[in-house]
Each structure stands twice: as structure tokens, then as C-alpha cells.
Amino acid sequence: MSGIGITAARTRQVVTSDGARIAVFEFDPPQADPDLPVLVLAHGWTLSHETWLPVVAELQRRLGVRVVAYDQPGHGRSRLGDGPAEVRDLGHVLQCVLDAAVPTGRIVLAGHSMGGMTVMAWGGLYPDEVASRLAGVALVATAPNLSQRKAIRGEAMAMRVLTRIPGPVPRIPGLSAQMVRNTFGPNPDPEHVAAAGRIMRRTSARTTGLYFGALNRLDEDASLAAFPSVPTHVVAGRRDRLISHRWVREYHATMPWAHLTMIEGVGHMPMYEATGEVADVLAGLLTGEQLPGNV
């Protein structure tokens, strides 16, 4: 962690009601600003909190902000519980993290991909928390449903098979590397692609298959209604091949209070591909000087 300019995190483990063991990472700045909310970060499918570290480093270079990140169940250093793997239940996991690491005070939530869906689900489940504590929301490369996604022939069966395979996802020479590259836009930094690939390969086959099913059952459109009183910023890459910018425009149109930043030449991983732009959005939410967006 120190290699990208942040100090080692304090870690804790949170156990959810279904027995999932959630690894939580707390990043304290050298000089904390007590007037700033705490930033809480949720990551995407088959990834881990590490995908947010470039943004954490950039933010703590600018601001004295305390940051809390965590690994979703079955991802990174967290372990699956006995309950169902559903995005709605990830909203409950987020609340468990808040209860343990940030029990009081103002917060800004940022979620990438499945992490953004987690934030939406949390809003629908905990409207009182939204009203009393939430100072800002950033929804990065995400959508409230994937109904417009075109399924790839055979993928559903393959993902069901993965749920029964112990250990990591079997590697297919050439194809596995191509899948990682496809999460980025054109001409990505090879070091970023390698970093994302290492994280993805650590995610078990069972977790990969279970949450693939959860994402395809996702429907959090109604949860967006929890946020109209909260400064909200939607961020998307125009070259995202997983969450189309057209889908993002469509759901953003149902959120007239939200700002939208569309980043040219960027794919599904703006924390790597456009670290400064993502940090700009989060800094604006943290300081109360929200950027206007560019769309």
C-alpha cells in the first residue's frame, strides 16, 4: 500500500448476521480534518478494496479525509456467509460495516460497479440513515439494473458450474487476460491491467458464479428515490464495455438532482484510468463544493 502513497490501513473483521466475515480497512490521513465526512468505498464484482487505493492516495494527498473501505463477501480477504448471494443483501453488509467502523457522524458513500449497486440497495433499505447521515453519493460505472445487457451464449451455464468449483476460476490461456483487458478502455496502462488481473484471479470460482447470478437478478431502480435530498454524482466511462454509457444516461435522466460526469476514452475502471477525475468528484462531495458534471 505504501507503494502508491498511502500508509498501511488499520484492519478489522466484521461478522454479518449470516456469518460472512468482512475485512474492513481504515485509512487515517497524516492530519485529519474533523470537519470532513468519512468516505466509505464499495468495490465491484470479482474485485477488492484495492481497486480504490489509487483514489485514496490522491484524495489523502489533497485532503485530511478518513477513508473506510472493505471487501465484499467472498472477495479479497472477506469470506462468504451462509445466506443468499444477492445485491440487496450487500446493502445490509454495508450497514454492518458502518455500524462497526463509522457508527456516528456524516459519511460520503462511493460505489464502483457492483459497489454502486450496493450503495443503491443500502439507500432503499436504510432511508433513515440516508436522511440523517449521508452527505454525498458517488455512483461510478454502475447501474440499478442490467436488463439491457445482452447475454453471451452459454455464460449462465458456465457461471452455474463455477459455483460448484473449489478454488479459483480455471484459467484459459489468452481468454482470461483478454477478459481483464476488456474491463478497461483503449490503450490502458499495462500496470493497471496487471493489478486488476491479480485481484480478479484471487476471487474464487464460487464467488464469481454466485454474484454473477445476483447481478442478473438486480433491480434497484426504486432505491434511487432514496437520494433526492443528497448531493449525488454519477460517473461513467464513455468506452465502458460492461456498463454502457447509454444505460447510465437513461438512469441518470430519472435523477434530476444528480450530476453526471462522462469521461472520454475510459472504460469500466475509472479509479485506475481516470484517478484524478474520480478524486475530483469525491473531493467535491466531501467539501460540499460539488462539481457540476460535464453532461
Image (cartoon, grey):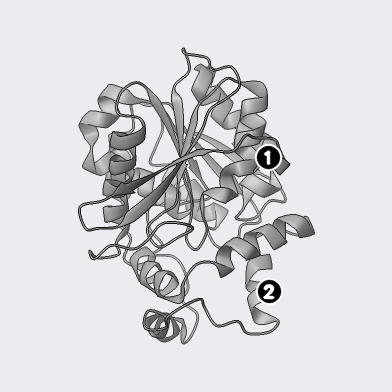
131 in relation to 197, above or below: above
Front-most of 76 and 114? Answer: 76
Residue that label 2 marks: 178
Residue 170 position within the rendered picture, expressed as x and y whole percent measured from the top left: 55, 83
The residue drawn where x is 52% and y is 49% is 49
- Tell me the CA gap for discs 1 and 2: 29 Å
Q: Residue 126, located in which quarter of the rendered image?
A: top left
Q: Secondary structure at mark 2?
A: helix
| N-terminal label among 1 and 2 | 1
Mark number for residue 2?
Answer: 1
The amino acid sitting under disc 2 is Gln
Residue 242 picture location, percent across and down:
55, 62
Q: Are marks 1 and 2 in contact (CB under 8 Å)?
A: no
Q: Nearer the viewer, residue 26 or 186?
A: 26
Question: In the picture shown, does residue 83 fall above or below 97?
Answer: below
* Image point (57%, 20%), residue name: 64
Label 1 neighbour load within 10 Å: few <14, some 14-19, many 20+:
few
Q: Position of residue 29 (x, y in %)?
A: 58, 24
Under tag 1, what secondary structure?
A: helix
